[in-house]
Image (cartoon, grey):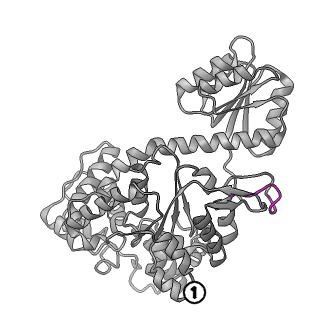
């Protein structure tokens, strides 16, 4: 399991404590910067940002409590306070002042590393929660259009948000499944708690099991200490299982048990852990076909499909294309500090005529490229045709097969160029690219690594 490393500021007036704690964190792979007291720490904070601050409470010049208040005033950097025996009241005061956690001397390496992991995880989830409403507002056009289909979808989202039942969101790649899941969470009673997503297609069965359920120290090679999984990190909130159809059949049985009994065990443990989460799953596959082929458990399907939600493809709601296009042009032009380019009447007609195989994601990616590369001119049909991909109406003048006359490329060259073109055109969506090229995502990833493609 790859652990995300952090840069930590250690603040303590005792040389031995700074050196010992620094050695523990460095050995675990974290970056370490040290300061002797609160004033020295402030100077370090002026020079750079840190992922976490670990500070002693009793220090000369500026104590840890004052430093904590100043760190919190700067932003959301988590602070862990270190207390000596008999100073628990001060530790409680620090927690009230916004400390992420406290640890009492003497402590072992495993304890401080676990506290650091917890603080970093909570900080990440708090940042995500803070951004969730802004993101949902920004992405609302993807799910909040004015067509009858989208009005019905929006009403369904609002109804589902009030329930704790499992939701299964189905739809083609790029239709906004994750955005919809976030919208359900943001409107639900769990909205103040974490929203945690895991891409089930991106990990092997062994890694996904550990990612979902966590593991104990020594559970497998490289498991140097206990680690919480996504079910625990989403405690009280919502867990999104993205592309749930790609879960290995063996792991499907364990997921079924969690949904049925609301308990699970970390890898390498027999101790049950209660799962207080709302589960939302997404898929771009035909799960009925997967069930017939023996690739997906029928009982798991019924557990997931309590509240089904089908997202329409963009070509099924063509009246949404132009409002979405204008929204994306305005958004991306604003990010670039530019005036949004204007769609000419024949440009509007070209957008509406195109099939959009990559759906809303392809539309947004296309218009973002247009904002960057075509700013300052009207977007007519001639301009747009250079950006519209194969699959939506045939290859255009900007297609991948731009070899010089008389040049006969090798099959490998053609395959590499087609793959690069598909990745660029479909916005890097590996599931959609694999589907369009008729290969597995595993094969696609291997080719991307082999040819060092941007994906």
| Residue span colored magenta | 214-222
Side of 357 where 5 appears, left or right:
right
Question: Does the segment drawn in magenta span residue 215?
Answer: yes
* The one of 192 and 10 positioned closer to us in this rendering: 192
- Magenta span: predominant SS is loop
Q: Is residue 409 visible?
A: no
Say if 206 sits above or below 117 in the image. below
User: Picture coordinates of residue 256 (x, y %)?
Assistant: 60, 71
The residue where tag 1 is placed is: 294
Side of 70 where 314 appears, left or right:
left
Looking at the rendering, in which quadrant would you find the N terminus? bottom right
Q: Is residue 425 visible?
A: yes
User: Picture coordinates of residue 88 (x, y %)?
Assistant: 74, 23
Residue at 55% x, 55% y: name it: 277
Residue at 41% x, 64% y: name it: 177
Question: Does the segment drawn in magenta span residue 401?
Answer: no
Q: Secondary structure at mark 1?
A: loop
Outermost residue toward the top? 61
User: Picture coordinates of residue 194 (x, y %)?
Assistant: 53, 48
Q: Quadrant of residue 173?
A: bottom left
């Amino acid at each position: 399991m790859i652990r995300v490393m952090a840069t930590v500021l250690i603040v303590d007036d005792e040389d031995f404590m700074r050196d010992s704690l620094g050695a523990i964190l460095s050995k675990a792979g974290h970056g370490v910067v040290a300061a002797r007291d609160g004033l020295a720490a402030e100077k370090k904070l002026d020079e750079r940002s840190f992922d976490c601050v670990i500070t002693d409470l009793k220090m000369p010049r500026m104590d840890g409590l004052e430093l904590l208040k100043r760190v919190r005033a700067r932003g959301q950097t988590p602070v862990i306070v270190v207390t000596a025996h008999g100073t628990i009241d001060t530790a409680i005061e620090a927690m009230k002042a916004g400390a992420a956690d406290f640890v009492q001397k003497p402590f072992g390496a495993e304890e401080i590393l676990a506290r650091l992991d917890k603080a970093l995880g909570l900080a990440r989830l708090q940042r995500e929660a803070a951004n969730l409403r802004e993101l949902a507002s920004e992405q609302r056009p993807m799910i909040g259009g004015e067509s009858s289909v989208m009005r019905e979808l929006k009403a369904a989202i609002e109804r589902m948000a009030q329930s704790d039942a499992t939701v299964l969101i189905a739809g083609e790649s790029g239709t906004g499944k994750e955005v919809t899941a976030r919208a359900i969470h943001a409107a639900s009673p769990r909205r103040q708690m974490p929203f945690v997503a895991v891409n089930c297609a991106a990990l092997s069965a062994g890694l996904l099991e550990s990612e979902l359920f966590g593991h104990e120290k020594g559970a497998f090679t490289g498991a140097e200490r206990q680690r919480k999984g996504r079910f625990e990190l989403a405690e009280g909130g919502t867990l999104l299982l993205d592309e749930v159809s790609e879960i290995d059949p063996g792991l499907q049985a364990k997921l079924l048990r969690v949904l049925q009994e609301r308990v699970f065990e970390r890898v390498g443990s027999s101790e049950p852990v209660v799962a207080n989460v709302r589960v939302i799953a997404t898929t771009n596959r035909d799960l009925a076909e997967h069930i017939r082929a023996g690739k997906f458990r029928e009982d798991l399907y019924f557990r997931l499909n309590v509240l089904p939600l089908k997202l329409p493809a963009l070509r099924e709601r063509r009246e949404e294309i132009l409002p979405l296009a204008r929204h994306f042009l305005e958004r991306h032009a604003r990010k670039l500090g530019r005036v949004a380019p204007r769609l000419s009447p024949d440009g509007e007609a070209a957008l509406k005529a195109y099939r959009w195989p990559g759906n809303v994601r392809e539309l947004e990616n296309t218009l973002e490229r247009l904002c960057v590369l075509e700013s300052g001119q009207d977007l007519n049909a001639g301009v747009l045709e250079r950006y519209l991909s194969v699959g939506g109406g045939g290859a255009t003048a900007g297609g991948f097969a731009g070899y010089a006359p008389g040049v006969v490329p090798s099959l490998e060259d053609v395959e590499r160029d087609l793959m690069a073109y598909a990745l660029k055109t479909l916005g890097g969506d590996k599931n959609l690219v694999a589907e369009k090229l008729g290969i597995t995502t595993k094969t696609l990833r291997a080719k991307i690594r082999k040819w060092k493609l941007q994906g």
